Amino acid sequence: MTDSKKMHLMIVLRGFIFVLTALLLISPSTLSGQGYHIEVTMTGLSNDTLILGEYFTSRMVPKDTLVLDKQGHGVFIGSEVFEGGLYLIYFNPNYYFDLLLGDDQVLKVRTDTSDLAGSIEYEGSEDNRIFQDYKNHLQQKRGELVKQQSLLALAATNSDSTAILEKLKQINLEMEETMDQIGTDHAALFVSDFIGATRESFPPEEILTGERRHDDSIRYFYYREHYFDHFDPFNIRLLHTPLYEGKIKNYLTRAVAQHPDSLIVAVDFLLNESRGQEELYRYMLITLFNHFAESKFMGMDVVYFHIAEQYYIPDATWSSPDFISKLKENLEKNKPTLIGQKAPNLIMRQIPPEHFEMAAQDTAIRRDPHIGQDFFINDIEARFTILYFWETDCGHCKTTTPALQQAYARMKGKGVEVLSVHVINSIEGKEKWVDFINEHQMYDWINCWSPYSNEFRKLYNLQSYPQLFILDKEKKIVAKRITPEQAESIINNLIRIESKNIS
């Protein structure tokens, strides 16, 4: 077996082992009828208080309590059924177990504190009976996996390794078949939904033949298209399990292309489909809103402000009016310069190179604010335009501006133009600007400023400097708030993509 084949199989097996381990950390549950009635017997406890808790994503929320009698017996009882999901019966960090609550919410649970996991029994709950059997089966398979992995580490020949990997593959296949069987035989039970949510979507062997076996794009597209085969993101019971939040964030980060357009489609799907369930919609909206608010990746503010404008501002009635007001204000400030938008057109005044040279010898010229020719940035014809806002008194600008000059020297033959905008429009600011340009010999790009207006600061929401934007041929913003090195890399990559498309 080749190293690449061995690596592919190990990746699949690692994914399975992760699911296996996650499931073994979780335990059983139940529910049904009018209200809930969960009878608990815990041998080894006496006159102790138990808590019935509900998982809400990764958090546990107490829902009910009881005091066991001298025989360790008690009943959780209530007139209204729970939503369902994964629940927890808790005494202390050493004595607790989980249970699934589906439609059968009238059940009995018996266990012994001397062997809490091994002695647990359920009566009246098919969800938990099936899940307990499944976990026992997983425990057995885990032992088989550990044994085969130990043998693999000691394998002396390729044939030995191949045989062991085939056994590991067979164990994985058996587990997949077990999960398929539970899904087929018990489709109406919550246990089927829960086990399905633990699964990952791997392409079947029959589509990974020949060269396709080593094509990562095949795996990605299969994973993306089949992500929801076993996991229903609109099953509110799954929201009440520790699995849900990870599955949603995993979908956004691994199954969806990390481009604002693709992510907006995914966000719209999740939010629009969950609207009919108030609790789920609120969770989904808050989670997605915060996820993109916290993102450090360029362009994710497009998705954040899309969620804010289309969903959060009109629907988040739980938020304070002050927060909504500030969010609206922030949206209005940032909306004109979101990636994909056409850059706000500015009228700037270009200062010719000879003026800087003459100003070095003549104080009157150096202080004259009227020199130059006005132009609109949309009138600049270039394959890519770097719009660069800076000032001479800014510490970062003093290092970034020369770095951009060096990058521009490597790019200007590729149809790239730089509009270097000095943002201080006072006489003293012009003098410092002239000195800086002359000192660094920055004559070969467009040096410009706005001597009579600061409107550009508002239009581009300029709070600090330097700020660098890349505009395409149509003056749409393709990148922003990046370094000169990043700008050069992005432009070169876009040129390569253009060249491929043409060829």
Image (cartoon, grey):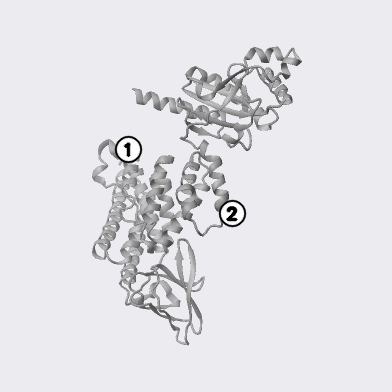
Where disc 2 sits, the SS reads helix
Residue 482 locus on image (x, y percent): 55, 33
Q: Nearer the viewer, mark 1 or mark 2?
A: 2
Image quarter in which the C terminus is found: top left
**Is residue 466 something that shows in the picture?**
no
Relative horizontal placement of residue 194, taking residue 434 as reference (left or right): left
- Is the Cβ of the residue at disc 1 closer than 8 Å to that at disc 2? no
Relative horizontal placement of residue 210, taking residue 323 as reference (left or right): left
Residue 63 locus on image (x, y percent): 47, 73
Task: Tell me the residue at 59%/22% (across/down).
Answer: 405
Q: Tell me the kind of residue under disc 2.
A: Asp
Location of residue 330 (image quadrant)? top right
Neighbourhood count class around disc 1 (C-alpha, 10 Å): few under 14, some 14–19, many 20 upward: few
Relative vertical location of residue 20 with respect to residue 110 in this rendering, above or below? above
Nearer the observer, 198 or 399: 399
Relative horizontal placement of residue 403, taking residue 426 as reference (left or right): left
Residue 33 locus on image (x, y percent): 33, 77
Label 2, on which residue?
322
Relative vertical location of residue 178 with respect to residue 264 in this rendering, above or below? below
Label 1, on which residue?
215
Residue 271 locus on image (x, y percent): 40, 53
Neighbourhood count class around disc 2 (C-alpha, 10 Å): few under 14, some 14–19, many 20 upward: few
**Is residue 262 something that shows in the picture?**
yes
Task: In the displayed orientation, state which residue is furthest to the right.
Answer: 363
| Measured Cα–Cα span from mark 1 to mark 2 | 51 Å
Where disc 1 sits, the SS reads loop
Q: Earlier in the sequence, mark 1 or mark 2?
A: 1
Nearer the observer, 257 or 323: 323
Relative vertical location of residue 64 with respect to residue 417 in this rendering, above or below? below
Number of numbered discs on residues: 2
Relative vertical location of residue 168 with respect to residue 406 in this rendering, above or below? below
Nearer the observer, 422 or 131: 422
